Image (cartoon, rainbow, N blue to C red):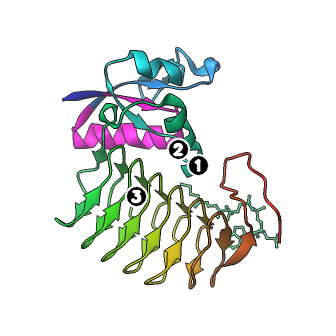
């Protein structure tokens, strides 16, 4: 069983530890996090070994467990490690149709479904019970929170964040770095970098990205 380090001692890491333990596809041997106060402590019984930058000197495979899309992409860019260093984790309860393409470094938690001809980019995170239907295509570093549902032929750019229990109508396009708030019903395309929310979803902020948990500020409209 391949040994793996989780990058960021986050809530997502805590969930991934449980998911890997139940699935038995890897052995989690440690966490890395830049918060020095966590070094030497444990999360879910797994030790926090040191800062993210020591990943380059380690031999284990890696999984990025930074919960927010933009921040996760920034850590990957900062580390600059080859894709071959990264693992991929899919919980044993997940249904991926045979035609699914799943990018390296992705984490797919319990109960997710991808029906037919679905493409999921690199380092994406699908939280529990995400539903992707026919011909959906996610860019790299996508984050879909628990229960998000995409109808058929939805296309996203890179680093999108789709909030929990939100639903996207078929044939829509979501640009790079956009955010859809939790519980939303999206009925039209979202241009790059905008945050939409509500049912029906409406523009909250634009045009710069404002993802939950990041420091980027935005122009309120
Ligand atoms: C959309 C979102 C990113 C906005 O966060 P924010 O920038 O901190 O915005 P605020 O909470 O200050 O809200 C700004 C306005 O948008 C409204 N709003 C925020 N989220 C909303 C949502 N999901 N649906 C409808 N309206 C929403 C607020 O009521 C507020 O309106 P007001 O200005 O009239 O009072 C955030 O609310 C959200 O939905 N995040 C996803 C959460 C999630 O799915 N977490 C899963 C973790 S596993």
User: Which quadrant of the view contains residue 211?
Assistant: bottom right
Report how far apart the C-alphas of labels 2 and 3 lie in the structure: 21 Å
Residue at the extreme right of the image, as rendered? 220
Please tell me in which quadrant of the rendered image residue 34 appears.
top right
Residue at label 2? 73
Ligand 1's image quarter is: bottom right
Question: From the image, which quarter does the N terminus lie in?
Answer: top left
Helix, strand, or loop for circle 3? loop
> Which marked residue is nearer to the observer: mark 1 or mark 3?
1
**Of 150 and 102, the residue lying toward us:** 102
Residue at horizontal 66 percent and vertical 53 percent from the top = 212
Q: Which of marks 2 and 3 is nearer the N terminus?
A: 2
Q: Which of marks 2 and 3 is in front?
A: 2
Q: Magenta stretch: residue 138 in it? A: no
Whether 150 is drawn above or below 98: the answer is below
Stretch in magenta: 4-26
Label 1 to label 2, Cα distance in Å? 5 Å
Q: Does the magenta stretch include residue 7?
A: yes
- Name the residue rendered at 24%, 43% in the picture: 23
Say which residue label 3 marks: 128
User: Which residue is tagged 1?
Assistant: 70
């Amino acid at each position: 069983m391949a040994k793996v380090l989780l990058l960021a001692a986050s809530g997502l890491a805590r969930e991934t530890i449980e998911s890997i333990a139940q699935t038995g596809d890897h052995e989690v041997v440690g966490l890395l996090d830049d918060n020095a106060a966590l070094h030497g402590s444990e999360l879910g019984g797994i030790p926090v070994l040191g800062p993210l930058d020591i990943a380059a000197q380690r031999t284990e495979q890696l999984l990025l467990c930074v919960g927010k899309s933009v921040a996760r992409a920034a850590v990957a860019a900062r580390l600059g490690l080859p894709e071959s260093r990264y693992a991929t984790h899919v919980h044993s309860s997940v249904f991926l149709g045979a035609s699914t393409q799943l990018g390296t470094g992705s984490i797919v938690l319990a109960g997710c479904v991808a029906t037919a001809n679905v493409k999921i980019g690199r380092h994406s995170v699908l939280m529990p019970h995400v539903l992707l239907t026919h011909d959906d295509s996610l860019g790299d570093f996508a984050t879909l929170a628990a229960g998000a549902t995409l109808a058929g032929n939805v296309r996203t750019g890179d680093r999108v964040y789709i909030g929990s229990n939100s639903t996207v109508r078929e044939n829509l396009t979501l640009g790079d770095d956009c955010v859809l708030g939790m519980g939303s019903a999206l009925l039209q395309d979202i241009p790059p970098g905008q945050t939409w929310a509500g049912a029906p979803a409406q523009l909250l902020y634009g045009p710069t990205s404002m993802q939950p948990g990041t420091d980027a500020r935005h122009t309120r409209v």
